[in-house]
Amino acid sequence: MKGKKRAVGVAALLLAACLALIFLTGGGGGQEESIQAVMRDAVLHEENHVALLGMEVNPSVASGLTVTGLLLLVAALIRIFAIPRFRYVPGRFQLVVEELVSFFRNLAKSNSPHRNGFLGAYIFGAGVYIFFGTLFELFGVQAMTTHGTSIALPAPLSDINAAIAMGFLSYFVILSGGLTSNGLRGVGKTLKDFSLPISMSFRLFGALLSGLLVTELVYYSLALSFVLPVIVAVLFTLLHALIQTYVLTMLTSVFYGEVTEPHAPKPPKNANKAAHAAAK
Amino acid sequence: MPLNIDFQQIFLHLFNFIILALGLYLLLYRPVVAFMDKRQAHYEELDRQAAEKDAAAQQKLDAYDARLKAADEEIQRRNADANRQLEAKRQERLQRAQEQADKLVEEARKAAERERAAMLEGAKKDIAEMVVSAAGKLADKEIDPAADRALYDRFLEEAQAAQEDRP
């Protein structure tokens, strides 16, 4: 009985190996576009567009909307079914949710001790969006382009437009914090770092794009698309998701804390003179 | 635009993210933060109540300690009083016993004196009677030295016997 099972197993393995060799040695599969075209499209999204409400948009917009819809759905489910059942001694799921919220709240508190209510909510939203948006590309959700071809939806922030939106919004959040805390002085402090929105945008875009490009490169060759993507894609994507979430939220918190720091009034000149005289 | 930067796409992403951030804030961030703040307030309240109870217990303990100390002092004071009273009573009884003993000794001495006096008086009377009796016998007899000596010895023996018979 055992011998028969072993023989069937060996035969199945041999068949699988033959099929793999047939596919690997075949000429077709994934090489209809040149590598240059694939990379260029991954960076610029010039070729493949998706139809959305009568507009032709980049696939990342569709990705962003999908991620937003999924996240809001999950949040609504948690709000309806989980949060009313929260207990003072938390269970595992409650612990995960509380830890997620506490992480961003504490990040805001530690970097901006004087004003952090709005900052905590903002970096929570941004962090969740960057993390889950980056992980979204792992699922390879398919969408139909305007040319009628099928593409896997990329991470929303692998589009420079999304990165610019995120970078500039973060900058305006910092600016608003400076304005509400220190008035024009806060605005001045924020405008001093005028390169911040560009650096934040490009850092986010570059980091996420590099992951996408590596994955595209790996997927481009059929021979490399077995086993290896499990390591490369998952590992790179997870690392990018974690690192970029941390970097953007940390930078936003630090700059927000800097511009919302209360301005210490200068001591009057007479007081300085009196202090010098007393020292002499 | 270079790098395929498109303001429409940027605003679409912006719009999308603002909706997401607002939704996450309303659905997740605010309720969870409110719950955590409520829990923190609850535990702070418990902590405050525990501190109040601790302070009340400490006050009671201090009060009991003070009462115990007062009770100890009272016991010591009463012990000292009792010891003083006991000593006084002992001295009084001792003195009374001494007085009774002295009185008994004095009475015994007086009784002995009286008995001695009575005995001497009785002895004198007996001697006088014996002398009178001896004188009468002498008057009836002739003078004989041997008889005198025998009479004298007899007198002495009788006197000694009378002395020994008296208690």
Image (cartoon, helix red, strand yellow):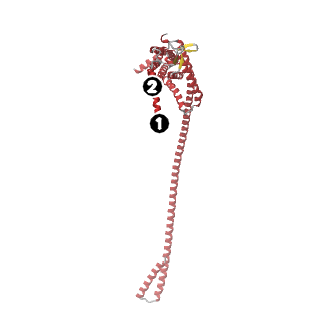
Tell me the residue that label 2 is attached to.
Answer: A18
Residue B161 versus residue A173 in the image, above or below = below
| Numbered circle sitting on residue A185 | none
Tell me the SS state at disc 2. Answer: helix
Residue in front for this viewpoint, A235 or A107: A235
Residue B15 versus residue A96 in the image, above or below = above
Percent coordinates x, y for residue A107 in the rendering: 49, 24
Q: Identify the residue shown where x is 51% and y is 62%.
A: B97
* Subunit under mark 2: A
Which corner quadrant of the image does residue B60 belong to?
Answer: top right
On screen, residue A14 versus residue B52, left or right, reads left
Can you see residue A182?
no
Whether the residues at callouts 2 and 1 have beta carbons within 8 Å, the answer is: no
Residue in front for this viewpoint, A264 or A4: A4
Same chain assignment for discs 2 and 1: yes
Percent coordinates x, y for residue B12 in the rendering: 55, 15
